[in-house]
Image (cartoon, rainbow, N blue to C red):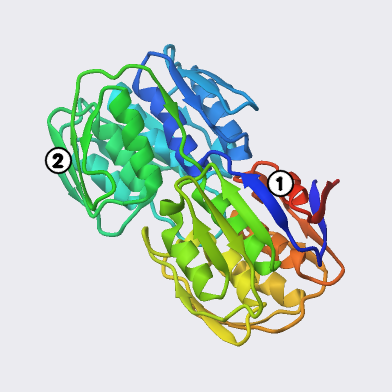
Amino acid sequence: MDKIRVIGGNRLSGRIEISGAKNAALPAMVASLLTSDVLHLENVPYVRDVLTTRNLLQKMGGAAEVGEDGTATLRAFDIQSFEAPYELVKTMRASILALGPLVGRFKKARVSLPGGCAIGTRPVNLHIAGLERMGAVCEIAHGYIEASTTGLHGSYILMETVTVTGTENLMMAATLAEGETVLDNAACEPEVSDLAGLLRSMGAQIEGEGTRTIRIHGVKKLHGCRHKIMADRIEAGTFAVAGAITRGDVEVVNCNPRHLTSVLTQLSQTGAEVTIGPDHFRVIGRDPILSKNVTTYPYPAFPTDMQAQYMALMTQGDASAVITETIFENRFMHALEMIRMGADITIDGRQAIVKGGQPLTGARVLASDLRASASLILAALVAKGETVVDRVYHLDRGYHRIEEKLARLGANIERIQ
């Protein structure tokens, strides 16, 4: 099993290019189930979750090719199976996204209840309730969601809580439903808008993405198209924190800074110098790093996927900061590993109190989830001595060769077996 070894103390400097967004690529790939035509995707990150999704589509009988050059060619022409099996999707929550397209086009689906990072309860009841409102019959049996319909119809669906995958799933199903579907209290994340753009290019009639109300007018058939996946805003944010925490000078290119307004604003408040261009930004870390509280909320507020990285930054702050996690109830597991490195962190329910100014020292640490992996590497960049991060298969789910990118910025980092 691979590990990442870091020798801390180097100031990062240079220019880094951001990969395509994993969280946009996965629903885009699954959207290929909505048509028998070829779907060409560009800027697809070559990460573990993408390859798992490729394998899932192939298992169903679809043609799916993903290249390290960022291209993917997908065609769901001869689908033989309507099941997303447990053995393929147990490590990836995005498997639930197969449910909507399968029911929408083929009128049946059997999808394993999803796995993924162990960061708290992420119920699928909103997915099921929405499909039932559209005319599907759903039940959970033997660890699977089994759904069938004689034909989906449009409906008004009020989502009790904001859910990105729920919005994406129901949006895809509704593209082939009869009539109009209204998703109220929908997720506004850029990845949802990216998917809506793809679906429109396939012939879907969608409006309102990026707002809390999305309207989908069902059509009879969708066709293939070519689509470029948006840049990964969380990867960009991670490198922004890397520049700030090492008091470095990092320019992040091929991204959309507007997707990171909350993160870059927060970094500015901690004392970092942030300059923004149309498709790039630059972060220059300054001393002292100011301790500032933060609370995670759905987009456009500070994202839960940046909470762990921000915690690493706050270990180097000049005072104490309170980090409040409102999205997931079990997303502070990385704090225990940072404490092993010398951090002073107290967990109180959904809040973490981080006392800054504590020198970190290298240690062997265990990654519990995708973003925790990144946060431990960030902490290791400023720790004295050697840190070895284990279980980096979590990291590989969403970051493409992050150790190589950090090394190009001057980090003393390598992947070991």
Badge count: 2
Asked if residue 60 shows in the view, the reply is yes
Where is residue 77 shown, x and y percent of the image?
A: 42, 12
Name the residue that disc number 2 marks.
155
Dot 1: element: helix
Q: Residue furthest bottom?
A: 319
Above or below for 27 versus 313: above
Q: Is residue 151 left or right of residue 36?
A: left
- The label number, if any, that marks residue 60 in the structure image: none
Q: Which circle, 1 or 2, is nearer the viewer?
A: 1
Residue situated in front as seen by the camera: 176 or 288: 288
Where is residue 115 shown, x and y percent of the image?
A: 53, 48
Q: Is residue 212 left or right of residue 301?
A: left
Tell me which residue sits at (55%, 27%) in the image: 54
Nearer the N terminus, badge 1 or badge 2? Answer: 2
Residue 208 placement: quadrant: top left
Tell me which residue sits at (25%, 18%) in the image: 221
Q: Is residue 256 left or right of residue 249?
A: left
Q: Give the residue type at disc 2.
A: Ser
Please rate how many residues cluster around mark 1, counting C-alpha atoms within 10 Å: few if below 14, some from 14 to 19, many from 20: some
Q: Label 1 vs label 2: CA separation? A: 46 Å
Above or below for 182 versus 294: above
Where is residue 150 shown, x and y percent of the image?
A: 21, 25
Asked if residue 328 shows in the view, the reply is no
Q: Give the residue type at disc 1.
A: Lys
- The label number, if any, that marks residue 405 in the structure image: 1
Residue situated in front as seen by the camera: 242 or 200: 242
Dot 2: element: loop
Residue situated in front as seen by the camera: 113 or 185: 185
Residue 19 placement: quadrant: top right
Tell me which residue sits at (67%, 60%) in the image: 249
Please rate how many residues cluster around mark 2, counting C-alpha atoms within 10 Å: few if below 14, some from 14 to 19, many from 20: many
